[in-house]
Image (tube, rainbow, N blue to C red):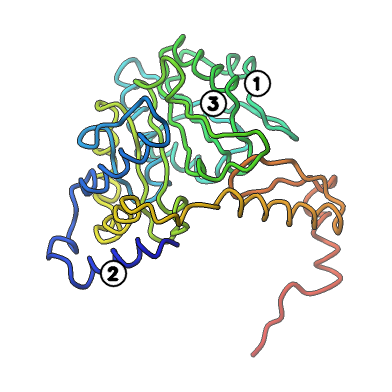
Amino acid sequence: GSLTARQAAAEALLVGSAAANQYSAPAGLLELREEVSRLYARLYPGDAYDPASEVVICTSGQESLNAALRACVSEQVSRGGRDGVIVFEPYFPFTQGALDNAPAVMQPVRTHAPGFAIDAAALRAAITPRTGTVLLNSPHNPTGHVASEAELAAVAEVCVEHDLLAVSDEVYEHAVFGEGCRHRRLCDVPGMRGRTITVSSAGKLFSLTGWRVAWALAPARLATAVASAHTNLTYSAPTPLQAGIAAALREEDGSFGGVAQLFGANFELLATALREHRGLTVCDAQGGYFLVADAGVPDIDFVRPPLRDRPLCERRL
């Protein structure tokens, strides 16, 4: 993890002002919101988020996702009872819990191995009068799929046509390693800036996942709703850790450089081992932290021989 971030957080804890160890404003330290705004202005020129009204610091990407879904569902329910959320399967395991908390109803759209691309026809077929929100995750957990320009255009077309809001979980945006792939934001597609909440994570960016600091970027009205939901969930992210992340972003110490290359090398190492030593079919990934493999048999049949032939662990007294 970032040495700059750790040193700045330690300084805030030990020698900072009294305020450094108290609650921050629910939306987060202004200095961190400003640095997040500057980061995205550099990464994606042509658009900037107002740090005062369009950036909300949350306690983990998972909490950001919960708050973002609450914000979207609340707005859509108030506009006509539209509590349905399109979710692409397979999905992040905690998605169902986030929908339950919203509360919302999942409207699943299946994607298929080995590529797990979004089927525009299947997406359209899933839309009902109840649908109010689309949840997109790219790079995707667990498949490693990175949404293409055409896929994002298909999602945007449906959102604009049916006046849907979107939550775009992009916590692995800096971990795209597929040849010829690059991360594209849903909010950059025409018609989507004013209807998309983008979620990302300092923990993933700086390999400091235990810090649980993340953010949501959204137009002001949705950001206000995210901040309100966040206030009722955790109130504020840890103040000294926010200061640490702000310092690392400000100094650009390079600690998140090479993340994509590291994840790509790890994917190839594990994929090769599973193919050559276990005979599995591995689905190619373009980004993220995960790997999907097909054993060709039911899961219990795959794990039974190793469990029978050798103990996985030994209990020592």
Query: Which quadrant of the figure has residue 223?
Result: top left
SS for callout 2: helix
Residue with the most extreme top position? 161
SS for callout 1: loop
Residue with the most extreme bottom position? 317
| 310 w.r.t. 247: above or below | below
Of the pair 31 and 73, the residue shown nearer to us: 31
- First reached walking from the N terminus: tag 1 or tag 3: 3
Name the residue type under label 3: Gln
Query: Which quadrant of the figure has residue 317?
Result: bottom right
- Label 2 sits on residue: 10
Of the pair 217 and 120, the residue shown nearer to us: 217
Residue at point 44% right, 23% down?
Answer: 188
Residue at point 18% right, 48% down?
Answer: 25
CA gap, disc 2 and disc 3:
44 Å
- Label 3 sits on residue: 107
- Label 1 sits on residue: 119
Residue at point 85% right, 45% down?
Answer: 296
SS for callout 3: strand
